[in-house]
Image: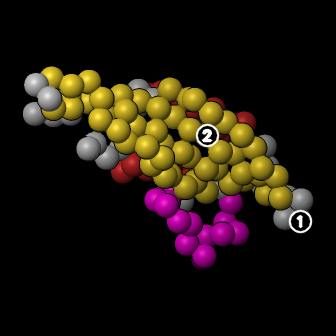
Amino acid sequence: MIDMEVPVITALEPLVDGKVFRWVVPDEYIDQYPYIRVIEIDNTDEDYRDNKAIASDIVIQIDLWVKDDPVPLLTQIDNMMKSLEFKRIFVTTEFEEKTGVIRKIMRYKTTKLKEE
């Protein structure tokens, strides 16, 4: 199994002053926009040789929370994920009327070869 969450987090940290979190956003950051959460959605074996998987199909979800126009950051995130050889496969938006917070939910997929 190949872990791509850590490389994704490391790549995205400069975009939001280090406010990239794995799995859960700590309470002390809930109101400090923008911030990102990274979650692995799927990680399955792929491409077999001699009854052993030689690659992993990996799906990563990136949640971006902002209070202003998300497009500049979305473009940077998308470019960064493409540089890591991910392909965007899903995007949706949630808007919280009471707070004015926009949450963009993006999913990316890649296939990575396992090292021997």
Q: Residue furthest bottom?
A: 28
Q: Is there any visible trace of residue 7 in the rendered image?
A: no
Circle 1: element type: loop
Q: Amino acid at mark 2?
A: Met
Q: In this view of the protein, which residue sits in the foreground, 39 or 27? A: 39
Above or below residue 25? Residue 63 is: above
Residue 29, percent across and down?
A: 61, 70
Q: Give yes or no for residue 32 being in the magenta stretch.
A: yes
Q: Residue at x 35, y 38 (%)?
A: 44
Q: Amino acid at mark 1?
A: Lys
Q: In this view of the protein, which residue sits in the foreground, 20 or 24? A: 24
- In the picture provided, is 65 more to the left or to the right than 76? right
> Which picture quadrant has residue 111?
top left
Range of residues picked out in magenta: 20-33
> Which picture quadrant has residue 19?
bottom right
Q: In this view of the protein, which residue sits in the foreground, 99 or 33? A: 99
Q: Which residue is mark 1?
A: 98
Residue 76, percent across and down?
A: 58, 35
Above or below residue 87? Residue 61 is: below
> Which picture quadrant has residue 17?
bottom right
- In the picture provided, is 100 more to the left or to the right than 12? right
- In the picture provided, is 26 more to the left or to the right than 111? right
Q: Residue at x 69, y 45 (%)?
A: 104
Above or below residue 81? Residue 102 is: below
Q: Which mark is residue 106?
A: 2
